[in-house]
Structures are given as C-alpha cells and as structure tokens.
Amino acid sequence: MTGQPLIELQDLSKRYGIGEGEVLALDQVNLRIERGEFVAIMGPSGSGKSTLMNILGCLDRPTEGTYRLDGEDVGSLDKAQLATLRNRQLGFVFQSYNLLGRTSALQNVMLPMLYDRDHSRTPEERLALAGAMLEHVGLSDRGHHHPHELSGGQQQRVAIARALVNDPSLILADEPTGNLDSKSGLEIMALLQALHGAGRTIVMVTHEADLAARADRILHMRDGLVETDVTNGSSLKKMGAEVAA
C-alpha cells in the first residue's frame, strides 16, 4: 500500500534482562497497519504479543528500532508527551475491564477527559459526551450504576465507551472477551466489528481463533517474530518470506 500507515514498526526489538538472563521478547519486527484496519494478534504464551501491545500502547519502549504512530516517531517523546499521546490518540480495552469500583459507569467513561492537560471541555461537555458514549454502546440507562451492579458484558461496554470518549486514532483491545461467557463475548465482538465498520482502527490480542477470524487480518507471533500475516483467509507472509496466497 502507498501513503502513510497509522502504525509503522521498523526493525523493532525488545530485550529484558542482561547477560545469560537476557530474553529477546521482540526480534526485529517490521509491521504496517493502515488506518481503518482490524488486526488480531495471536500466539502462545511468551510469543511477544503482550510486549508488542505494550509498545503499541506507549506503555513500554523498544530496545532497538522505530515505532511511528500516525507519522510521529514515538521514541522521540518524553514521558509527559507520551502520556498526552496515550490520552488523546489511544483507547484501551482490557480483559479485566479496569473500571473504578466505587465510581459510576458515567464517571468511569469521563476519566480520560479528566486527564486532559488542556482541560479543553467544560464539566457539562464532559458529562454530555460520556452520556453519548454510553448510549453508543447501548447502556444509556446504566450511567449511574456502579461496576458491581453490571454484568461482565456491560462492564466491558463501559470500558469500550471510555476508550472511545476522546475519539482516539487507535483502539487497543487486550483479550477483550477473556472474562466473558460465549454470548457476551460475541456481543462485544459484534460491537468491535461495528466500530471497525464505522472506520475505527482496532488491534486486538486474543487466544480464540473464531473471534480472530472476524478481524480483517491475523498476525500469529512466535519467539518474538511475526510468524504469519494472514488477510482474508490467505497467508501473505510466513517467517518473513512472501508465499502464494
């Protein structure tokens, strides 16, 4: 593809430890993700998928290589700049929801706006936008409920609303159905697919092949490498070499 991708990784490596205890979590990964793609990442424990997600989410830095998000070299940013980038350009959805237990659904959705250093929205605007996001995920009648009063699927919908509230460039979903029953998991996947259909870029880690199959593209990782890159059911890359689809 031509043009600037949303995500571009060049020779990205991540090492932990030193000497004989050194672990190579990512090994010179090269990757492009275009705007509007829905990409699923799979792989066994220790394959590097969690490390990759942490780097994409600007929660960790690579040891070597370059990560560009929307054309910006993330490695050139200091801690404060990274915090601003995370707040404005990234939306996170976690397996365990990560909601504040003593805070209402509406207040949980408002949190990213409260961390906006520029305070660009009034309290009334924040409240209205959080309410609109809850309505968008089908929970307009649950705004004043606390997490313990919501089902797992409803809690994850609140988390998705929170991820959307600052209109991020990228949604990162780490095992978003991992704590849900099958029915609720399918409902969350349908919501993610609808967001993708509306133009959102989504990168999702999952262990479930049937859910990954709903994405545009599946990356299989092993030993810190992107072992296969599959689009529309056709294997495009294997161990770095082009193969016939």
Image (spheres, grey):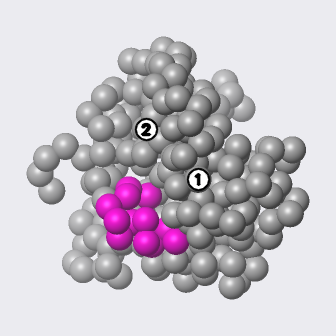
* Dot 2 alpha-carbon crowd within 10 angstroms: few under 14, some 14 to 19, many 20 or more: some
Residue 47 percent across, percent down from the top left: 59, 55
> What span is in magenta?
191-202
* Three-letter amino acid code at the position of disc 2: Gln
Q: Are marks 1 and 2 in contact (CB under 8 Å)?
A: no
Q: Secondary structure at mark 1?
A: helix
Query: For the residue labelled by badge 2, is the local secondary structure a helix, a strand or a loop?
Result: helix
Find disc 2 in the rendering and name its residue: 89
Above or below 136: residue 194 = below
The residue that appears at 68% across and 28% down in the rendered structure is: 17
What residue is pinned by disc 1? 131
Image depth: mark 1 or mark 2 in front: 1
Instruction: Specify whether 37 is left or right of 220.
Output: left
Q: Which of the pair 169/210 is nearer the observer? A: 169
> Which corner quadrant holds the N terminus?
bottom left
**Horizontal arrangement in the rendering, residue 136 relative to residue 44 (left or right):** left
Position of the C terminus by quadrant: bottom left
Q: Is residue 196 magenta?
A: yes
Residue in the foreground of this view, choosing between 232 and 104? 104
Q: Residues within 10 Å of mark 1 (few under 14, many from 20)?
A: many
The image position of residue 169, as x and y in percent, is 38, 45
Which residue is rendered at x = 43% and y = 65% of the image?
A: 195
Residue reaching furthest front? Answer: 124
Which amino acid type corresponds to the residue marked 1 in the rendered image? Gly
